[in-house]
Every structure is written in C-alpha cells, then in structure tokens.
Image (cartoon, rainbow, N blue to C red):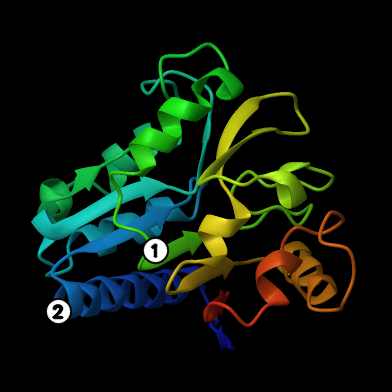
Amino acid sequence: MIEERFFKGLDACAQAVSDALGDDLVAAIAARGQASLAVSGGRTPRVVFPQLAAREVAWDKVSVTLTDERWVPADHVDSNEKLAREYLLQDKAKKAQFIGLKTPEATPEDGQKACEERLARVPLPLDAVYLGMGEDGHMASLFPGSAALTESSGACAATVAPDGVLRMSLSPQTLLNARHLILMLSGEKKRAVYERAKKPGPVVDLPLRLILHQDQVPIAIFIA
C-alpha cells in the first residue's frame, strides 16, 4: 500500500503533491458530496499550498484542518494556522472551511476537549492528509518517545516537542483512519531517516514507522 515517487527537484515534487491532493479532493466530492483535508506546516508547504489553492476544486465543499499545531496564537509567526491561511486559503481555496487546532485554553491538555469538539465538525475519515517529516523521524507532532504514539484514544493528542514547545497533534488513530496519506520529503538527511524507518523497529524510536508498517491506509511517498 506504499507508492514511492521520485523527483529530480523540489518544484516538480511539490507540483505532483498538489496534483495528488487536488485529485483526492475532487474524487471525494464526486463520491460523497464533500471532502476533508489535513495539512502540515513547515517550509515545503509554502510551495505546495499556492499550487493547490489554484486548483479547480469545489472548495466550498472542502473542510481543511491541520495535522498539528504549536500552542501559540493564530497570528504568531510559528503558527501553522497562520501558514495555512496565508498560503493555502487563498485564490480559489478561499471558499474552504477551516478548522484550526489551537483553542483559547492555556495548554493543549486543557484544550483537548475543545479541540476534539472542533474536529467533530470535520468530515471523518479524512480524505487526504499531507504530511512532512522531521530529521528525527517525527510526523505531525508525534515525536520519538511521545506517549501519544501508544496511549492516545481521541481524534487529537497533546504533545511536547523536543524544544519544549507545547503542541496539539492529530492522533495516530486519526491518521491511520484516513483514506489517503501523502508524505513529502527532500534532502539526503531525511531520505536516510526514511530508509531507516522502512526497516522494522519500535515506532516510539521512529514515529514515521507508524504509517510505513501498516496496511490500513494507502500512502504515497513523494521524494525530491
């Protein structure tokens, strides 16, 4: 259930990712009258998002949420919501409904219930999930050693990044219940981590293994 696609440059890879996401949304709307998409933050989405936003999709039938969020205000420079609003929810995609993960509560733990209620407004299972990965093998905000990898039971999970920043992440269950996962990675370091994660081993050591060693959801890997 893993499809690998290789590209010579980041631009070509980003275009292919945006095309794949757009195709998933169009197919979902045709089949069910609505679509749901979860997207990640980082540098690469700044290339993918504008291309996806220009895609001919019935965006008024699309619900967009995040794979994870730092527990910072929505206008903070490190906010994934800010990134999504500035780069994705533009052009034709302005019509999409956005559901963020950051709630007014002081901590992710305090905001867990409110975040679960927000995610209940998103049509689940997610039709498409756009993931990135870190050089430590994390995805979303599921980091090595995180209890959320094995103990979370809801749609989202409160986590803490290695730098101490509080975060909210979609739970492993939400990711594995999706209809399609799309992972984009680039660079020699991340490629090496990906190759390690393809080998059997503890998920708590390399969280990427969570999606690579399962047969529940198809996953496409876009590698630049």
Question: x%, y% of residue 205?
Answer: 87, 56
Distance from the alpha carbon under mark 2 to that under mark 1: 16 Å
* Drawn side of residue 35 relative to residue 20, left or right: left
Question: x%, y% of residue 216?
Answer: 58, 78
For label 1, the SS is: loop
**Which residue was labeled with disc 2?**
30
The amino acid on which the numbered mark 1 sits, given as a three-letter code, is Pro
Locate the N terminus by quadrant.
bottom right
Front label number (2 vs 1): 1
* Drawn side of residue 120 relative to residue 101, left or right: left
At horizontal 19% and vertical 80% (from top left) the residue drawn is 31
Classify 211 as above or below 141.
Answer: below
**Which disc, if any, is residue 105?**
none
Question: x%, y% of residue 221?
Answer: 57, 77
In the depicted view, which residue is nearer to us: 166 or 75?
A: 166
**Which residue was labeled with disc 1?**
125
Question: x%, y% of residue 177?
Answer: 50, 66
At horizontal 48% and vertical 45% (from top left) the residue drawn is 41
Locate the C terminus by quadrant.
bottom right
Question: Disc 2 or 1, which lies upstream in sequence?
Answer: 2
In the depicted view, which residue is nearer to us: 7 or 199?
A: 199
